[in-house]
Image (cartoon, coloured by chain):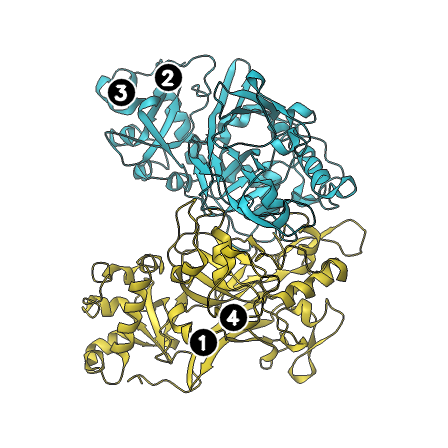
Chain colours: A yellow, B cyan
């Protein structure tokens, strides 16, 4: 229990303690904060007040909370992340007087969430996107290549992934213009230039690399979790018509790199640990470098909510769960580095679209509308196949167990009309 | 003519004036330099001595030459790059006394190239690799997918590109371990884990983005050249067996991201301007957003040289030219941003393998050995199909016209044995 009010349905209980970057009207310089209930807690203020001076490993780096990205803090490595989070939990607990009874410090450090602006939390070096949901890969494969070639022979042997664009990763709340480019309107005819007519979302989660590896030295699967700092929701916006035309043979490019949205609060792997579950059975048995001991999937409820430009409220159009993901985060990291590829603090690895086994759990409008063959029903009789201009979308995600709730807040985006 | 000796076959005449990052035993902090003949010129020393104080646009940012990457200088935009290069040409010319007659400053600033260490010149945000040589795309297409599907329908409509890995881009001279991973030894059987058995190079050039664009606002093709800072040689090392197994449907990943080598000296687009030529005819006519006025290909001679682990000297195994590239750098940049994707100072865009029309001008060992079907002949009767451990490779590139030579130096790499 915290001395700060936390509603039962809040994603940000004292069991969470995520990290993010905030600024305020009165102090526009971005700095590090955590969130609890409907408040942000400015960690740079607590650090200046000496409240972290006895956290081992952090004590000599108190300036990390005055940085405009989390990277410096992340680079301190897992024992420091763990100790810091525990210390913050203690500072915010109802039984601890230090902050609770320091009215002046509380005024300065504890800020109503409505008064803060959140920023991209991490300076992302490289962004990789995996393709780790078997249901999604199968669904999209059927639509792009037909049933015969849906799942490629490699898919069950390795977590297929590709490099994405780091420059266009934006924080929740950023509006994105509808992309333009080449797409084929009539099959077999030449492509035309114009705005995407098949604007889509992808429901993903992603982890941030906390500490990396030297070029040439892989991270082994058993150690992978210790290299991960935390996770976020990720919307891998996709222009399906641009993607379908361009993606052979080297993969998606302009169909994706106009924007990727992540949620603002990075939930630590420590906070997610209680929600570990066994993932899907893997057949064939993975090669030894991908073989894990113990559970490594996470039971995280996921939702896609859509508010149409016509107005009204958000409708839930999909309910999925991260536990459906075939290849775990740890397997992704081990695979990514098995050839010696180096990861750096701040690298982002997306899961790929998380589709569940049923039609109402698909993680993209491409799947939900089955490539536009059927309508997605919204409240008030409104329908969609793909996104229209000024539609807004929220991804949500949360864990619940034994009365404890840990969640990710929202990953929000709005599609603006294309440039004229 | 410079007062510093420049041999006739040097890549670094006074017409070049590239930019790079150096350090020395006596001063290990990396900083900005140019190169002329067999000397590096420490620009941070010249800046401190006041020699750039009347270069407009640079005068208020003289600290850019004390940075450990070129990015700060690059962000000052093209008029400043142009003025700075011209000013350096004047300072180094035989007729200019300022530096020529200042013995103490010369001692401090002009360093024998053998005494300096070169570093990765640019802090790379995103690295994109194109696939812009028709000959290469056709050759590889035949080998990976058969003659029928060699060149995909999109290829003649747009410059196909994909995102690469920025973290593993290294400077010339860096040794790389042979990557390990999954590859299929016998067609149709399950993959095995082990070192790549088909280690290859790719002869490429690349440009660095000098100034970028805001997310959502494309760079139009007519303006693209003004956004490019300069060019380098690039070796896109490729593990063909890993790549062949993993690359469907989302493109190359671990077959590439274990290392990419760039040459140390960034040759400015200004220095390359005299070598502009008309590129290959484009049929079909590109869409308006890809339509250029005037020549935009560069006549740059390229070579691949291989020194086998058995010893001996380097053998030239391919002679190609950048002018064979079907899609120009400007078209690549316009296409990359047409959907609103943002480029940032320091982004790297590779051309893709530059293969010429003849068998001795192919830009990869995959093509030169036709997927291992024939031997590549080296001096002394030694042969190769792919790279062996401890083989060394140099890419070279230079322009020549009217007695003027501007070149890139070398892009060197060595393949070390895989981890045990």
Residue at the spot of label 1? A275
Could you tell which of marks 3 and 2 lies nearer the N-terminus?
2
Mark-to-mark CA distance, 3 and 4: 58 Å
Q: Which label lies toward us, 2 or 1?
A: 1
Residue B93 badge: 2
Figure quadrant of the N terminus of chain A: bottom left
Q: Mark 1: few, some, or many residues within 10 Å (few <14, many ≥20)?
A: some
Q: Determine if marks 3 and 2 fall on one subunit.
A: yes
Mark-to-mark CA distance, 2 and 4: 58 Å
Q: Position of residue A269 (x, y in %)?
A: 40, 68
Residue at the spot of label 3? B106
Determine the image quadrant of residue B239. top right
Residue A178 badge: none
Q: Which label lies toward us, 1 or 4?
A: 1
Q: Is residue A185 left or right of residue B50?
A: right
Q: Chain of mark 4?
A: A
Determine the image quadrant of residue B65. top left
Assign a secondary structure to mark 3: helix
Residue at the spot of label 4? A412
Mark-to-mark CA distance, 3 and 2: 13 Å
Could you tell which of marks 1 and 4 lies nearer the N-terminus?
1
Q: Which label lies toward us, 2 or 4?
A: 4
Q: Is residue A78 above or below residue A279?
A: above
């Amino acid at each position: 229990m915290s001395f700060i009010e936390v509603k039962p349905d809040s994603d940000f209980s004292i069991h969470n303690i995520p990290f993010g970057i905030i600024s305020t009207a009165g102090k526009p310089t971005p700095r590090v904060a955590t969130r609890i209930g409907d408040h942000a807690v400015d960690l740079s203020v607590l650090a200046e007040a000496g409240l972290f001076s006895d956290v081992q490993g952090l004590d000599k780096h108190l300036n990390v909370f005055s940085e405009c990205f989390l990277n410096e803090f992340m680079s301190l490595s897992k024992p420091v992340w763990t100790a810091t989070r525990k210390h913050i939990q203690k500072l915010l607990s109802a039984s601890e007087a230090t902050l609770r009874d320091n009215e002046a410090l509380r005024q300065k450090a504890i800020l109503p969430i409505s008064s803060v602006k959140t920023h991209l939390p991490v300076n992302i070096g490289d962004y990789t996107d995996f393709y780790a949901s078997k249901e999604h890969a199968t669904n999209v494969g059927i639509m792009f290549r037909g049933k015969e070639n849906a799942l490629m022979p490699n898919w069950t042997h390795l977590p297929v992934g590709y490099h994405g664009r780091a420059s266009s990763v934006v924080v929740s709340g950023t509006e994105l213009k509808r992309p333009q480019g080449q797409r084929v309107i009539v099959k077999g005819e030449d492509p035309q230039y114009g705005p995407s007519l098949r604007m889509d979302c992808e429901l993903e989660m992603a982890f941030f690399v906390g500490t990396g590896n030297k070029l040439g030295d892989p991270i082994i699967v058993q150690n992978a979790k210790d290299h991960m700092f935390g996770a976020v929701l990720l919307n891998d916006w996709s222009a399906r018509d641009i993607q379908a035309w361009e993606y052979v043979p080297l993969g998606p490019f302009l169909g994706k790199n106009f924007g990727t949205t992540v949620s603002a609060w990075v939930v630590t792997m420590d906070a997610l640990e209680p929600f570990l579950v066994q993932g899907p059975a893997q057949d064939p048995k993975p090669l030894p470098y991908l073989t894990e001991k113990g559970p490594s999937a996470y039971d995280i409820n996921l939702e896609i909510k859509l508010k149409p430009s016509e107005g009204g409220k958000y409708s839930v159009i999909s309910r999925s769960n991260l536990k459906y993901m075939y290849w775990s985060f740890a397997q992704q990291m081990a695979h990514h580095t098995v050839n010696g590829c180096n990861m750096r603090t701040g690298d982002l690895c997306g899961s790929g679209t998380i589709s569940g086994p049923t039609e109402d759990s698909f993680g993209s409008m491409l799947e939900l509308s089955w490539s536009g063959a059927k309508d997605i029903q919204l409240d008030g009789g409104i329908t969609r196949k793909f996104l229209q201009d000024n539609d807004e979308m929220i991804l949500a995600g949360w864990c619940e167990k034994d009365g404890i709730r840990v969640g990710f807040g929202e990953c929000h985006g709005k599609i603006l009309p294309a440039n004229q």
